[in-house]
Image (spheres, grey):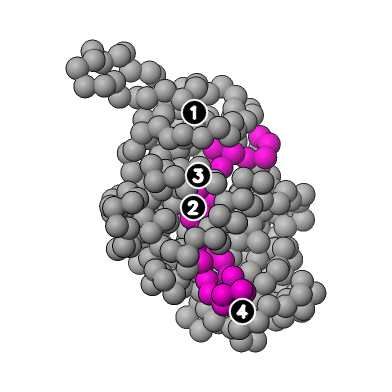
Amino acid sequence: MRITSLIAVLFTVLGLCADAGKANAGLFVSVTIAPPALPVYEQPPIPGPGYMWTPGYWAWDEDVSDYYWVPGAWAPAPEPGLLWTPGYWGWNNGVYAWNAGYWGPHIGFYGGVSYGFGYTGVGFAGGYWSGGAFFYNRSVANIGSVNITNVYNKTVINPPGAPTTSFNGGPNGIKASPTPAELQAASEPHTPPTKDQTEHQKLASQNKDLRASNNGGKPPIAATSRAGDFSPKSTFAAKGAKTNGLVKPASLTPSRGRADHSTGGKTGGSTTPHTKNALANKPGTPPKGTPPKKPMVARRAPPPPPHNPSKKASH
């Protein structure tokens, strides 16, 4: 195992794919051991309008020479119109290099990794921005009991038998290269992870239970309701993880894809995302014994943009 400088890693991954190098920036760390497979977990309910889903991933801790899981989480976009491109591990010449995620106006290359919840390996089918508001695809986003009116429903088909492989290239890795659209997205202005996301990863690195050597690739905290919120009521375990009853167990829902969803209620927290044309957080189900309220009529969303990448990732 070894960690290298930014310049050294850049030279290392040049052989992976010239186009992939153009499609990603932010290469910081490389190791000689492949990251574990992605755990299967459910997506917590969205805490409110304007939040974006950021998939979980394996990060490397050089101090203990081990991978640790950074839970998936809902996080506010830095500003309206920005989408999250997840990071990914890429292999070349015997090392696995990390390509950091970023915010941008379009989704870039993320190694063909099928993170789920709209991230099928190419692009993002979980929603889109329109008129300063984000419209959510209910087929992959867990709206839960939050009252969000900017919604639509479009089936997202994951590749048959989509693997849980978490890295691109190398032995048993995903074979995928950037599409023309992803290469174009690489030349656009990018915004690094937000303060909430950075703190989220820091907290994950300090939790020994999230280390792969301790959880066998099944972290007891696979997802959280908000970035940086690791309180028991906001955490969701991976399927098969040992939780000791401290977090909510995962439950599979095949119609939701490989990574699953819950119908939990409101969660705490104080971060306020950018919102427009969206209602405030309200429980959608009245307490037992309370007369039901007249249901809200969801605002009709404009047609979603086509999700037909010119070149799909292969697994």
Q: Which mark is residue 85?
A: none
Dot placed on the residue nearer the N-terminal end, 3 or 1: 1
Separation of residues labelled 3 and 4 (CA atoms): 29 Å
Quarter-wise, where is residue 176 in the image? bottom right
Q: Secondary structure at mark 1?
A: loop
Q: Position of residue 195 (x, y in %)?
A: 67, 46
Identify the residue at image location x=68%, y=36%.
79
Separation of residues labelled 3 and 2 (CA atoms): 11 Å
Residue 260 shows in the view: no
Separation of residues labelled 2 and 1 (CA atoms): 22 Å
Total labels drawn: 4
Viewer-nearest residue: 109 or 3: 3
Residue 198 shows in the view: yes
Q: Quadrant of the N terminus?
A: bottom right
Magenta stretch encompasses residue 78: yes
Classify 10 Å Cα crowding around label 1: few (below 14), some (14-19), many (20 and above).
many
Q: Which mark is residue 229?
A: 3
Which portion, as a residue range, is magenta? 51-80
Q: Secondary structure at mark 2?
A: strand
Q: Mark 3 belongs to which amino acid?
A: Asp
The residue indicated by pointer 2 is 72
Dot placed on the residue nearer the N-terminal end, 3 or 4: 4
Dot placed on the residue nearer the N-terminal end, 1 or 4: 4
The residue indicated by pointer 4 is 31
